[in-house]
Image (cartoon, rainbow, N blue to C red):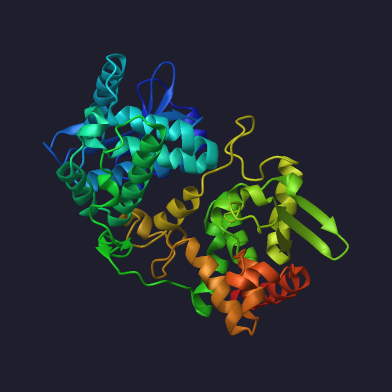
């Protein structure tokens, strides 16, 4: 069945809800709590296993779908999530024992890098993702003395991961190389310790393109055509109000998903020429550049309607909160999971019969909407400099050094034209 929060509140101890659109995801009720769980058949031994994901309603349905999708991908890649979690716990305990014995293990090296560098220089989201990367994929190396890691061990770890996810392997290689450099600079491992992560598989970990419906489709960059944009805009009410609002802001502002979900009411202002969303430099992707400035986004059409409605609801705080009082905004992947769940190849046969649950369109992702905005602006005749400013891209090279024009008026003018264009497509 489709998850219904009202029905979930009425469940008694011992009952559960099975979510048809997410095979294996269920809400199990005990005498004291309601727990999201993932029930699946292990690809390693064929046994049925169940793994707790989190408590509802603290963990929302959308967040549970995101966690379920991560676990499902692990299982599809041949890993058993429950066994992997158990093994990770055992490794953490073993690493702690070695640390107490005075051995400078890979686990300690990674921890020093995370605390001494990553947590000082990266945003919370980046910190979380880097910690997850460096604690989840090191396998048996966590217990090995850092100075004793061999070239063969480094190669085997990266090569194994590259067979499943080459981009992830490349990211891991880069972070481990930086972690070893940090340890060498700090004098925590001998100066003659080779940094194999900088040497093995250099230039050989490349993406095979995204996977759609279980198959690699190459590295083609997708932009929706005019008919698809019109179809999507008309179909938006079939998404949840949260997802519909997020996708609307993608199309009407061209902003990044991570910036949209972190929007705050205090960043919205009405000025003589209209309404603006002023994104502080520290929250932008360009924050590390000295020449970067706050990102000014004009709010027109449906974007303005969405933002003003949410400011009325949530005031100066997060406009896309997880839940009142938790102090968090929704994660960017909530939108991606919702889009994925709307595909004809994703939904169950029962839901496939319900046209309102299925967006019959070639596979796409929320980030494709940014590319769609850029492509459409070019087709409408928008100058490149203005279109790049709309997307929040900094001018490259010497142009970025000397051209300090804000393009505020031009951005408002072209986004107003784009809004009218989207509305005309939706009306067809």
Residue 410 position in % (x across, y down):
74, 74
| Camera-nearest residue between 171 and 89 | 171
At horizontal 18% and vertical 45% (from top left) the residue drawn is: 151
Residue 353 position in % (x across, y down):
37, 60
Q: Is residue 50 left or right of residue 31?
A: left
Quarter of the N terminus within the rendering: top left
Quarter residue 13 falls in: top left
In the image, residue 74 sits, relative to residue 56, either above or below, namely below
| Camera-nearest residue between 425 and 326 | 326
Residue 56 position in % (x across, y down):
47, 30
At horizontal 26% and vertical 19% (from top left) the residue drawn is: 98
At horizontal 44% and vertical 16% (from top left) the residue drawn is: 32
Can you name the residue that lies furthest to the front here?
192
In the image, residue 406 sits, relative to residue 40, either above or below, namely below
Can you name the residue that lies furthest to the right here?
272
Task: Count all numbered tags in the image, as a single digit.
Answer: 0
């Amino acid at each position: 069945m489709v998850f219904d929060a009202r029905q979930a509140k009425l469940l008694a101890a011992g009952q559960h809800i099975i979510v048809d659109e997410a095979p294996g995801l269920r809400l199990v009720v005990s005498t004291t709590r309601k727990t999201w769980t993932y029930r699946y058949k292990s690809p390693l031994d064929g046994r049925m296993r169940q793994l707790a994901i989190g408590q509802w309603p603290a963990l929302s349905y959308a967040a549970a779908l995101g966690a379920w999708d991560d676990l499902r991908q692990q299982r599809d890649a041949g890993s058993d999530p429950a066994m992997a979690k158990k093994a990770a716990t055992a490794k953490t305990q073993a690493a702690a024992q070695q640390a107490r014995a005075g051995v400078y293990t890979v686990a300690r090296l990674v921890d020093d890098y995370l605390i001494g560098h990553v947590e000082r220089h990266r945003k919370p989201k980046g910190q979380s993702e880097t910690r997850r990367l460096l604690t989840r994929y090191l396998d048996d190396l966590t217990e090995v003395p850092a100075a004793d890691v061999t070239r063969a061990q480094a190669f085997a770890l990266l090569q194994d991961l590259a067979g499943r996810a080459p981009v992830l392997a490349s990211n891991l290689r880069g972070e481990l190389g930086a972690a070893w450099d940090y340890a060498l600079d700090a004098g925590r491992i001998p100066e003659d310790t080779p940094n194999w992560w900088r040497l093995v598989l250099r230039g050989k970990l490349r993406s095979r393109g995204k996977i759609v419906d279980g198959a690699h489709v190459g590295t083609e960059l997708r932009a929706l055509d005019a008919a698809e944009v019109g179809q999507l805009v008309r179909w938006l009410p079939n998404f949840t109000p949260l997802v519909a609002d997020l996708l609307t802001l993608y199309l009407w502002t061209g902003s990044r998903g991570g910036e949209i979900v972190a929007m705050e009411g205090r960043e919205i202002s009405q000025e003589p020429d209209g309404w603006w969303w002023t994104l502080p430099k520290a929250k932008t992707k360009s924050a590390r550049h000295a020449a970067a400035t706050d990102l000014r986004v004009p709010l027109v059409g449906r974007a303005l309607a969405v933002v003003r409605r949410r400011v009325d609801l949530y005031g100066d705080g997060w406009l896309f909160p997880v839940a009142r009082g938790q102090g968090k905004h929704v994660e960017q992947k909530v939108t991606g999971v919702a889009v994925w769940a709307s595909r004809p190849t994703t939904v169950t046969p029962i839901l496939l019969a319900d046209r309102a649950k299925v967006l019959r369109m070639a596979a796409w992702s929320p980030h494709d909407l940014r590319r769609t905005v850029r492509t459409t602006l070019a087709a409408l005749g928008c100058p490149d400099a203005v279109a790049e400013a709309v997307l929040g891209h900094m001018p490259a090279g010497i142009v970025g050094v000397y051209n300090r024009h804000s393009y505020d008026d031009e951005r408002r003018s072209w986004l107003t034209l784009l809004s009218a264009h989207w509305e005309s497509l939706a009306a067809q």
